[in-house]
Amino acid sequence: MICPYCSHSETKVLETRETSDTETRRRRECNKCEKRFTTYERVELKPILVIKKDNKREQFDRNKIIHGLLRSCEKRPISMDDVEKLVDSVEYKIRSMGLSEIKSTKIGTLVMNRLKKKDKIAYIRFASVYRDFTDIKSFEDEIEKLTEQVINKTAK
């Protein structure tokens, strides 16, 4: 591993931790400048193609989900760790399906289902972009559905 500070090619691993089923976190120290840094190792898995709404295909990119979630969760009490865990959960679900292709609408649904449990406001924000709300009625309908679900859940 090359040191990001001095470019020396030898470092030592101080600590190793499994952060998820597919990722390992390593705390390292450079043998030359003695500065510390963290690396993450991911298992390289077969590529999954996402079928977009216009039927174009592109490679699955978890960073796109993270970007969308960060915008939806802006000024909400959701940590970066929460966002990462949500995306890990979605990616794990997709990979466990064993598919080589998946529709973007299915990915959006997986994200929304998890986000709804985490934060209702972030969910509405995400849904407004994902479902392409075009007027206030679309927002009202979604909020009404969400309210009914909360009422039904508390009544049980």
Image (cartoon, helix red, strand yellow):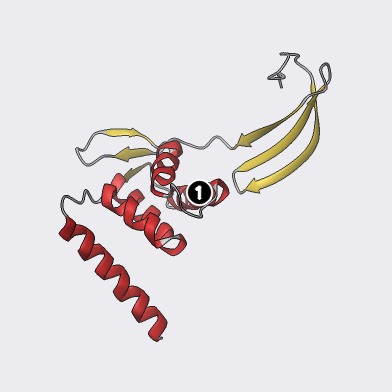
* Residue 118 sits above or below residue 43 on the image: below
Q: Residue at x 55, y 50 (%)?
A: 79
Q: Residues within 10 Å of mark 1 (few under 14, many from 20)?
A: some
Q: Residue at x 84, y 20 (%)?
A: 31
Looking at the image, the residue that sits furthest to the bottom is 156
Q: What is the x, y in percent for residue 20?
A: 61, 48
Q: Position of residue 96 (x, y in %)?
A: 47, 52
Q: Give the farthest residue toward the front.
A: 75
Image quarter (top left, top right, bottom left or bottom right) of the N terminus: top right
Pick the quarter of the image with the C terminus: bottom left
Q: Against 150, is 10 above or below?
A: above
- The image shows residue 27, relative to residue 74, as above or below, that is above
134 to the left or right of 58: left
38 left or right of 113 in image: right
Residue found 42% across the figure and 46% down from its top: 69
Which residue is under mark 1? 83
Residue 71, image quadrant: top left
Rendered location of residue 102, percent (x, y): 33, 45
Q: Identify which amino acid the numbered label 1 is placed on.
A: Val
Q: Of helix, strand and loop, which one carries label 1?
A: helix
